[in-house]
Image: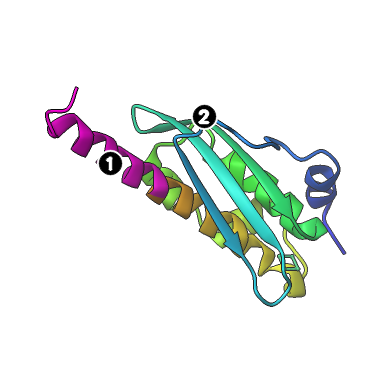
Amino acid sequence: MYSEKVIEHFKNPQNVGSMPDADGEGSVGDPNCGDCLTIYVKIQDEIIVDISFLVFGCTASIATSSMTTVLAKGKSLGDALEITEQDIIDSLGGLPKEKQHCSNLGVGALRKAIQNYYENQRIADAHDDDGVP
Ligand code: FES
């Protein structure tokens, strides 16, 4: 059975929605169950000042995506990269064994979104250096 915390985040997920002006975004899918998640981040001074997600998936994937954004919001990029699947599961008061893989989506999408932010920064820096106004 699901914990109260999982049910709470499933019924009232935090930070849902797309973010058209995101500084980075990352998407992952699980080929076995077909669930997929996109996470968007807004970064200021290496801190995640805003984060949101869109998910197509099961109850646990909605709850784990929501908890991923709650854990990552306000964290430095370095600290956010250290969030693990187990952190998400523990923060939700546990997950049934067969649903633990759902937490992979949150960690994977968050890391991809941060990676995408760094890539966007590199592109922006390269444009700053090319002499083109
Ligand atoms: Fe695969 Fe939930 S069943 S992410």
Is residue 131 highlighted in magenta?
yes
Give the amino acid at mark 2: Asp
Q: Residue sitting at 51 percent across and 51 percent down?
A: 26
| Residue occupying image coordinates x 40% and y 37% | 76
Rendered location of residue 45, percent (x, y) = 34, 27
Dot 1 corresponds to which residue?
Answer: 123
Overall secondary structure of the magenta section? helix
SS type, badge 2: loop
The image position of residue 34, as x and y in percent, is 72, 69
Mark 1: which secondary structure?
Answer: helix
Q: Position of residue 99 (x, y in %)?
A: 74, 69
Magenta run includes residue 14: no
**Residue where numbered disc 2 is placed:** 21
Side of 42 relative to 85 (left or right): left
| Residue 125 showing in the rendered view | yes
Residue drawn at x 75%, y 75% is 98
Q: Amino acid at mark 1?
A: Ile
Q: Position of residue 44 (x, y in %)?
A: 39, 26
Residue 27 relative to residue 58: left or right: left
Give the mark, 1 or 2, whose residue is nearer the N terminus: 2
Distance between mark 1 and mark 2 Cα atoms: 16 Å
Which span of residues is magenta-colored?
116-133
Rendered view: 2 above or below 81: below
Image quadrant holding the C terminus, namely top left
The answer to which of 43 and 83 lies nearer the viewer is 43
Residue 93 seen: no
Closer to the camera in the image, 7 or 65: 65
